[in-house]
Every structure is written in C-alpha cells, then in structure tokens.
Image (tube, rainbow, N blue to C red):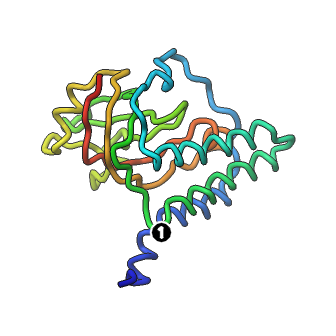
Amino acid sequence: MPDNPDSMLQRHIPWVALAVAACLAPGRGAAAADDAAQPSHAAITSVSPQREEDFIAIIEKARNKYAHAHSSEDRARARLALQLDMLHFVGGGLEAKDWIGIIRDKGLLEDGSMWLVVEVGDGIVLKTQHSLQNDPERATIITPRSAIFDTADKAFIGQRVRFSGSVLHSIIESDEAMVGRPEFLVHFDQLILLR
C-alpha cells in the first residue's frame, strides 16, 4: 500500500528545505584548511555497503565539477547540483546501515552526553551536534542512557567503526565547504568498533 502523501512530505521536508536554503544562501568564501594531519580514509580496508559508496560518489562527482568550474557561478551550480543529486538519492530519508567510517573527533558535554564526528570518505563527515543549545531535543547527541554511549566512549580518534543511523540533513555552508568538506547531521543508533 502506498505511503500517505502527508507522511511522505514530512519525510522529505528536511531535504527539500536544505535544497531551498542552499539556493538562497550566499557563498561565504574559503574555509580554513585542516590544521591536523589525520589517518587517511583510504586506510579503511573493510568493504563499505553499496549505498554508502553511492553516497560518496555523488559528492565526488560534485567535487570534480567544482574543481573544473571557471567562475563563482559555476561553483555555485556545482554545489546546487550536489544538493539536487543528494535530494534525489535520499528520497524519503537516508538510513545509514552498516556504513564504515573513522572517528575523527568526539567529546563530552556539560550534562555527560557525547558528541561524535565520523568521516566516511575523504572530508565527508557524519556527525552529531556539538552543543545542547544546538540540539535541545537531543536528536543527534548521544546521551549516557543511549545503547551506543559506552561503545562511543571507548572509541579513540582514528578508530574504524561500523555504524547505522538516520542522516537528518546537511549543514549549509559556503559552496567550497559544502562540496569540499560536506557535513551531515546524523542520529547514530548502532556503533561497532573495528580493528
């Protein structure tokens, strides 16, 4: 039986809002380069699921267009094409199931909750919010009662992980950041440490 149209629209709203906001958002110029050398994503030897590889391929395609752009308008079009391709890719939502990544950063908040940053491809980040002010409903932040809290707490920076969760939306940034270093907010619901 087909989904209720209202239910389908509600699942699309964060991604549609992302595409609309991106069309309206002006570029904010170049962002600072990474200041710390970290292990390469290529160091991951486990085979990633096809859905994860397809997700990364959309971003790589946009990076190629961006690299060959001759004007700021061409760069903006590369970013918009990325967002439209991603919108088409996610359909009613994006569930990351058994994706492979590397823990790039993590930390504790004042209430004992945890934030987490996982890189799934070169400069492609899935993460929680970094503050309770930005996530008052704790939609992404990992609380101490979460089933994955202890595992996340044991993980170290550079740790390979297999994870599942709901990718909520992309973070709107400059054209360069959205194509070169895209960040997506995610609600992690499974986390397994790999060697």
The extreme left residue here reads 145
The extreme top residue here reads 37
Q: Residue at x 32, y 36 (%)?
A: 162
Q: Nearer the viewer, residue 149 or 165?
A: 165
Q: Quadrant of the C terminus?
A: top left
Q: Nearer the viewer, residue 80 or 26?
A: 80
The percent position of residue 113, horizontal first and vertical second, equals: 22, 38
Left or right, residue 30 beside residue 109 = right
Amino acid on which disc 1 is placed = Ile
Q: Nearer the viewer, residue 64 or 66?
A: 64
Q: Residue at x 63, y 36 (%)?
A: 180
Left or right, residue 78 beside residue 187 = right
User: Mark 1 packing: few (<14 Cα in 10 Å), some, or many (20+)?
Assistant: some
Q: Residue at x 15, y 40 (%)?
A: 144
Badge 1 marks a residue whose secondary structure is: helix
Tell me where residue 20 sits by quadrant.
Answer: bottom right
Q: Quadrant of the N terminus?
A: bottom left
Q: Residue at x 31, y 41 (%)?
A: 163
Q: Which residue is mark 1?
A: 13
Left or right, residue 7 beside residue 192 = right
